Image (tube, rainbow, N blue to C red):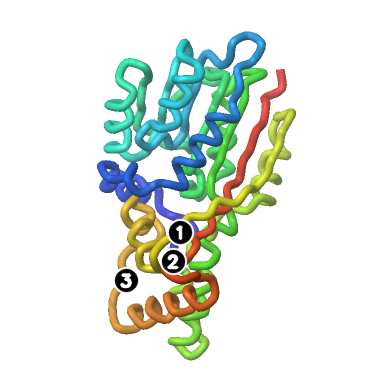
Amino acid sequence: MNRNPDPCRVAAAFHQKAAEYDQHTQVQKRVVNQLAGSIAPSADGGPKNILDIGTGTGALLEKLHGCFPDACLTGLDSAPNMCLRAQQKLGSRGTIINGDARCLPFDGGAFDLVVSASALQWVADISTALHEMHRVLQPGGWLRLAFFCEGTLGELQHCFRDAAGRISGGQRPLTSRLHRFHTLEQVRLIVADMDFEQCVLGVETEVDWYADMFALLRSIKSIGAGAVAGGATSGLGWRGILNEASRLYEERYGIPGRIPATYAVLSLTARVKS
């Protein structure tokens, strides 16, 4: 997997998988539900202008419309087909824009709530994205984020590294394919230099279960993340690494008939100073 996924490749991968995305996103749906459920109405009735970064098919905005039916909803995603599906889902309840989290096409202070769920792990320059989110928030506005961080798919990464080392005689080829998720400390250092108050960071764990490692890989590929993470590799050497990684996965982590896949979810809640 690539340490710094190319933004065009990210957009193209998720663009291609938009039609089937919702069928393969169980953990992402839980993240959306938890994030939406954590945003409580305030004394003045709640947010008036909401922006969702990496909106995907619009699941989070749909939830937030149920909580805040009078709010103006805006979603942004880099994948055109994701934007189309989100607009179809929301209809007149929201506006979806094709754009880049690193260069938001909005005026400063345009929103009083900016949210994002299960998207920022694919933004290599997360510092620029966070500063852009801060820019478009009005004084007193809230930032509420949840995305996968270091520790996500740890079982898969450990087994793949060890399998690659064994098959190659210790040289560990192809480990550059392993995506390095953002760390809690990395995000903490970025937001520490920003004009936030009431800033709370944390990490929680979600676990999904699969029949075997190959079922997990198919699920990752089905949402577009496989292509973002490194693209296709073939050949006997690669097949040998996969088979050995699968054996190690079941040996170390499996129970009869299934294996776990762990997702570390970083949450960030912060308020711009008034």
Amino acid type for the residue under numbered disc 3: Thr
Point out residue 138 in the picture as x, y percentages from the top left corner.
60, 18
In this view, 163 is above or below 43: below
Q: Which residue is mark 3?
A: 233
Q: Tell me if label 2 and label 3 are in contact, CB under 8 Å.
A: no
Q: Nearer the viewer, residue 5 or 240?
A: 240
For label 1, the crowd category at 10 Å Cα-Cα, with few meaning under 14, some 14 to 19 and many 20 or more, is: some
As helix, strand or loop, the secondary structure at mark 3 comes to loop
Amino acid type for the residue under numbered disc 2: Arg
- Which of the numbered marks, if any, corresponds to residue 258? 2
As helix, strand or loop, the secondary structure at mark 2 comes to loop
Residue 10 is left or right of residue 3, and the answer is left
Q: Nearer the viewer, mark 2 or mark 3?
A: 2
Residue 116 is left or right of residue 92, and the answer is right
Q: CA distance from mark 2 to mark 3?
A: 25 Å
Counting residues from the start of the chain, the first of labels 2 and 3 encountered is 3
Counting residues from the start of the chain, the first of labels 3 and 1 encountered is 1
- Which of the numbered marks, if any, corresponds to residue 209? 1
Question: Where is the N terminus found, in terms of image quarters?
Answer: bottom left
Q: Nearer the viewer, mark 3 or mark 1?
A: 1
Q: Name the residue: 36% across, 56% down.
A: 219
In this view, 129 is above or below 5: above
Q: Name the residue: 67% across, 24% down.
A: 272
Res. 83 in view: yes
Q: Name the residue: 45% across, 26% down.
A: 63
* Residue that sits furthest to the front in the current view: 256
Q: CA distance from mark 2 to mark 1?
A: 6 Å
Point out residue 202 in the picture as x, y percentages from the top left corner.
68, 44
